[in-house]
């Protein structure tokens, strides 16, 4: 009883301290992105003023959007509003940033979770297979393929998938998307090719990590005890082996999600998907800083939440973690 | 003495375990390295046998071989391991699994790493019981609590929900003992069960093992490098040197008069037993490497009594009163023991 209460308290403390730690990360991430925006050539005021606009007109626009303010003042202004829940609106289309996020982010999240799920569903069995037959040709084959999987760039693999599965066999649509909020099954269908393109690295990473930690666990002293107790190899693998490596696996999956979320920026471009990644790319190219800031904020918050969830799950799986 | 001869007679009549010419070697890309050669001994029901020798003499490997726990890919085991008449070395894996933890169990040297860190003590105890005996979850849990109480864990009903990291080293070794005994095996192999523990805890664990083996009639194969422990607990002593059994004798007689120079050397180097103020005697030199074993007596290079004739192969010779020694001079030598008459 006491340990359970203690573990709960540890978890509460962890959630609170993680959320507090997240605030400076949010400020820092948005500040860095804002700073980088200043370095990008092009001027949103010139774009807004349209072709052949006079210098006064451009200056007026600068004035109106606060673009003539010093850099720090502009950032401070954005941060102050964002803290109050106002992410502003696109300088170009006028669409509120919150609405842009709500429109595009579900598409991106669907692809990312789909890719992580595929990575786990394929990577875990491959890792187990390689570990239980470690040293065999099958093991070498899986690990060789995994090395290849880590090395293959996902945008290239995405284009290969479009070429064969979409254009030659016409199993999946080549481009475009349906919002999961309108039609979830259609969204899944559209998301399959992008998720496949994204999951190769994930499958490889999970298979490799799972194999190495399982092989390590299987040669450990406590597994020798399990053999000495007379448990069957299957029980040792599925019950003890997997629970022992689950923390490792979960950490890999958490990191993988972050990596895949970042990679959606490229894959959305390949498949012409209206996700948050492509919104960021467009907004950066046009200097539409409120959209960039809002989208980055949404992604950073997601990454922080996923990490927090991963760590919480780890404390459940391995009681020693909440003790530390 | 009467008790010992009684045990020795029983051992001959119907040994629980009888190891015959057990030779173990490990294969590696360059060939095969022999670890033990022609190890033979018996353990009677309820008997406590000590196996001593320096580290690397093949004690642990022999213990693991009895349970079939050596890595099957590299280990080559020759000879017979008869347990209740069945040769374990030829048993199919599934039958061997049913014996492990149920009829023969093992306690390891390192209690800190021998338990699974992510399962509760209770789960690890009940799982052992339930994989060998048909008992309900509830019953298994009650038995596990009893087993913990038996090995002296305070408030076992609460501690059963704890994880190994919440126990001290000595308490973990108690848990290991409880786990090894929960199916009431006929033989427990204890491989240096106290080496990793504090000195004060060592004595408690040894006492506990003896008490339990007395009360349950479990035979104990005590693998250790500590002759003192064997002297206190066991009825028979097996001395191993460089992968061979060099002497096998009742503990009392070997303490008084060892018949192999190596046993004598081990006994003389016990700290408590030599005179105060004197340098502790030690055996000079080191064990020859497995690939440089001499053809004759393996101890000859370190033996103070070596002469012409020791370079001949040494068989394990029967001597008087149930004793065996692997030394052709054992009849003529008078070797000092730990107890002087």
Image (cartoon, coloured by chain):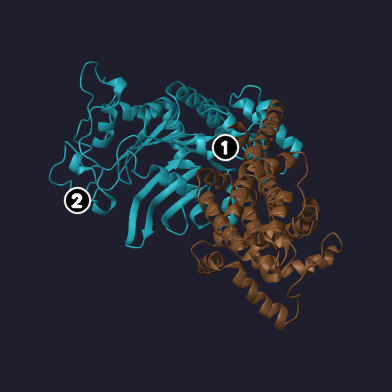
Chain colours: A brown, B cyan
Relative depth, front residue between B112 and A286: A286
Q: Chain of mark 2?
A: B
Q: Residue furthest top?
A: B276
Report x, y in % for residue A222: 54, 43
Q: Residue at x 31, y 36 (%)?
A: B320
Front of the two marks 1 and 2:
1
Query: Which residue is the site of mark 1?
Result: B180
**Considering the numbered disc 1 on the image, is that residue within a helix, a strand or a loop?**
helix
Q: Quadrant of residue A272?
A: bottom right
Q: Residue furthest left?
A: B308
Relative depth, front residue between B156 and B61: B156
Report x, y in % for residue B157: 69, 26
**Considering the numbered disc 2 on the image, is that residue within a helix, a strand or a loop?**
loop
Q: Is residue B314 left or right of residue A213?
A: left
Looking at the image, do the residues carrying marks 1 and 2 touch, with CB atoms under 8 Å apart?
A: no
Report x, y in % for residue A138: 54, 68
């Amino acid at each position: 009883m006491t340990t359970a209460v203690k573990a709960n308290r540890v978890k509460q403390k962890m959630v609170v301290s993680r959320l507090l730690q997240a605030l400076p990360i949010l400020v820092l991430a948005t500040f860095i992105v804002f700073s980088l925006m200043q370095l990008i050539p092009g001027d949103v005021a010139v774009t807004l003023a349209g072709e052949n606009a006079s210098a006064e007109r451009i200056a007026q626009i600068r004035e109106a959007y606060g673009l003539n303010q010093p850099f720090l003042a502009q950032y401070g202004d954005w941060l102050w509003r964002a803290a109050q829940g106002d992410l502003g609106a696109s300088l170009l289309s006028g669409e509120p940033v919150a609405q842009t996020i709500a429109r595009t982010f579900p598409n991106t999240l669907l692809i990312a979770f789909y890719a992580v799920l595929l990575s786990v569903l394929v990577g875990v069995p491959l890792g187990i297979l390689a570990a239980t037959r470690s040293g065999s040709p099958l093991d070498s084959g899986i690990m060789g393929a995994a090395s290849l999987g880590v090395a293959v760039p996902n945008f290239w693999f995405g284009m290969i998938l479009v070429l064969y599965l979409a254009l030659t066999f016409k199993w999946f649509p080549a481009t475009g998307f349906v919002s999961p909020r309108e039609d979830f099954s259609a969204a899944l269908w559209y998301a399959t090719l992008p998720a496949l393109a994204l999951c190769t690295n994930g499958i490889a990473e999970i298979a490799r990590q799972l194999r190495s930690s399982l092989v390590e666990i299987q040669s450990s002293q406590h597994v020798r005890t399990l053999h000495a107790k007379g448990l069957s190899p299957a029980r040792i693998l599925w019950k003890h082996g997997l629970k022992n490596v689950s923390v490792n696996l979960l950490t890999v999956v958490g990191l993988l999600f972050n990596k895949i979320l970042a990679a959606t920026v490229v894959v959305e471009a390949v498949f012409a998907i209206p996700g948050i990644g492509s919104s960021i790319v467009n907004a950066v190219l046009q200097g539409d800083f409120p959209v960039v800031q809002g989208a980055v904020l949404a992604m950073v918050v997601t990454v922080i939440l996923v990490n927090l969830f991963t760590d919480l799950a780890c404390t459940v799986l391995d009681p020693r973690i909440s003790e530390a | 003495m009467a008790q010992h001869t009684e045990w020795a007679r029983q051992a001959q009549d119907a040994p629980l375990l009888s190891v015959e010419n057990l030779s173990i070697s490990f294969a590696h890309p360059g060939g095969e390295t022999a670890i033990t050669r022609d190890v033979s001994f018996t353990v009677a029901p309820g008997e406590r046998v000590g196996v001593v020798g320096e580290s690397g003499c093949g004690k642990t490997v022999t213990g693991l071989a009895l349970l079939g726990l050596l890595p099957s890919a590299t280990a080559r085991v020759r000879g017979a391991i008869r347990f209740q008449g069945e040769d374990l070395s030829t048993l199919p894996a599934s039958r061997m699994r049913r014996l492990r933890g149920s009829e023969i169990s093992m306690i390891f040297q390192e209690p800190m790493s021998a338990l699974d860190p992510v399962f509760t003590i209770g789960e690890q105890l009940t799982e052992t019981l339930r994989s060998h005996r048909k008992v309900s979850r509830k019953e298994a849990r009650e038995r596990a609590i009893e087993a913990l109480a038996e090995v002296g864990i305070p408030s076992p009903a609460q501690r059963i929900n704890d994880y190994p990291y919440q126990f001290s080293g000595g308490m973990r070794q108690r848990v290991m003992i409880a786990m090894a005994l929960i199916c009431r095996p006929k033989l427990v192999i204890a491989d240096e069960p106290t080496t990793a523990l504090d000195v004060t805890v060592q004595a408690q664990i040894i006492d506990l093992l003896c008490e339990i083996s007395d009360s349950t009639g479990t035979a104990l194969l005590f693998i250790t490098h500590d002759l003192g422990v064997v002297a206190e607990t066991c009825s028979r002593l097996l001395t191993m040197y460089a992968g061979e059994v060099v002497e096998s004798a009742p503990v009392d007689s070997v303490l008084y008069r060892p018949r192999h120079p190596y046993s004598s050397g081990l006994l003389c180097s016990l700290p408590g037993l030599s005179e105060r103020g004197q340098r502790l005697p030690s055996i000079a030199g080191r064990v020859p490497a497995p690939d440089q074993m001499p053809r004759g007596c393996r101890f000859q290079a370190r033996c103070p009594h070596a002469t012409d004739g020791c370079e001949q192969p040494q068989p394990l010779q029967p001597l008087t009163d149930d004793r065996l020694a692997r030394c052709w001079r054992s009849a003529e030598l008078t070797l000092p023991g730990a107890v002087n008459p």
